[in-house]
Amino acid sequence: MTIDAVIPVYRPDDKFERLLKGLREQSVKLNKIIIMYTRDSETDHCRADGPDIEVHELSKNEFDHGGTRNKGVGFSEAEHVLLMTCDAVPADRYLTERLLEGFADKKTAVCYARQLPAEDASLSERFSREFNYPGTDRLKSAEDIKTMGIKAFFCSNVCAMYRRDIFNELGGFVDRTVFNEDMIFARKALDAGYCIQYKSDARVIHSHNFTNLQQFKRNMLIAGSQMEHPEVFGDVSSESEGVRYVKNAYAYFRKNRQSLMILPFVVTCGFRFAGYRVGKYKYRRSARSYK
């Protein structure tokens, strides 16, 4: 059973070094680590090296969330490909082993890991990790779209392993997208009769303390990518999931005796919602201008 890792890298910090170290210490070894390195300038080059490292450099203009990952997978001949981001760090040496276990069901196309908050994560970010990455496994199929909505094909390339033959059969990731290449593929897999496995014991440390403005911009991009793919997101509601998110946060803050955190959290959610609405509006306006 062969595994390669594909990691898009841009402006790496110490987390990237810990990521490489963690991958090299896994109980189930990787065949090679393919780095898709986006240069910050003409003089910027990837410093990672070793017999297990394969580096492919590209300019910022060449980078795309889907297309760059497709190219990385194309450099691999392994049976399974592990997609990760350069700021996610394995929580232990059993990450690859436990992700592989998710393919015991032959219908599993992709198995994604649980994300744990870093030590410096805010309480809001800790809640976000718990909400999106709970402590129980879940095998999701197309039938779950009726009850779970958008969560049925939630999947994250922060850390996700793909079965190579199914990935190729379904045409890989969409080549041009500013976001959501993982969920677009996951929905395609469900519609084709395959499953998505969430493995809660396969864990990486990954979190962000975004500012409200960063949340606004991020959700604007998310909305735009969703509007570009009505075949994926058109029959589910992101807004209803957002309402559930806020309700669960209220209970989480009260349980942690941090009720005063609710107000700034609601403000942040307002920025996120505003960004999402602006993203949808901008997409509709640009689409009309091309008619």
Image (cartoon, rainbow, N blue to C red):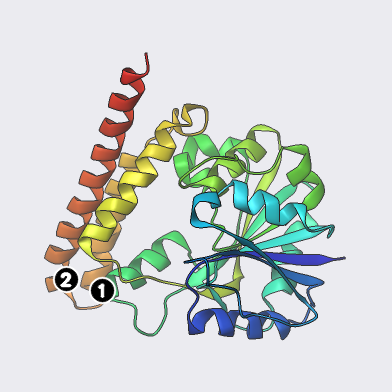
Circle 2 packing at 10 Å, graded few (<14), some (14-19), many (20+), is some
Determine if residue 163 is in view.
Answer: no
Where does residue 84 sit, x and y in percent of width and height? 60, 65
Could you say where residue 256 lies in the image, as x and y percent from the top left?
A: 25, 77
Mark 1 and mark 2 residues within 8 Å of each other at the beta carbon: no
Look at 71% across and 48% down and name the residue there.
109
Q: Quadrant of the C terminus?
A: top left
Q: Quadrant of residue 279?
A: top left
Q: Which residue is drawn at 43% across and 33% down?
A: 236
Q: Is residue 127 above or below residue 59?
A: below
Kindly identify the amino acid type of the residue bearing the numbered disc 2: Met
Q: Position of 44 compared to 123: left or right?
A: right
Q: Name the residue rendered at 35%, 40% in the picture.
A: 223
22 and 66: which one is in front? Answer: 66
Residue farthest toward the right in the current orientation of the protein: 1
**Residue 49 visible (yes or no):** yes
Q: Is residue 153 left or right of residue 56?
A: left
Residue 278 % position (x, y) = 24, 39
Label tally = 2
Q: Name the residue under label 1.
A: 255
Drawn side of residue 160 relative to residue 170, left or right: left
Q: For the view shown, which residue lies furthest in the top direction?
A: 291
Residue in view at x 43 percent, y 39 percent: 225
How far is the residue under mark 1 from the one under mark 2?
12 Å
Name the residue beneath numbered marker 2. 261
Query: Who is closer to the viewer here, 123 or 248?
Result: 123
Q: How crowded is mark 1: few (under 14 residues within 10 Å), some or many (20 or more)?
A: few
Above/below status of 24 relative to 84: below
Quadrant for the N terminus, please: bottom right
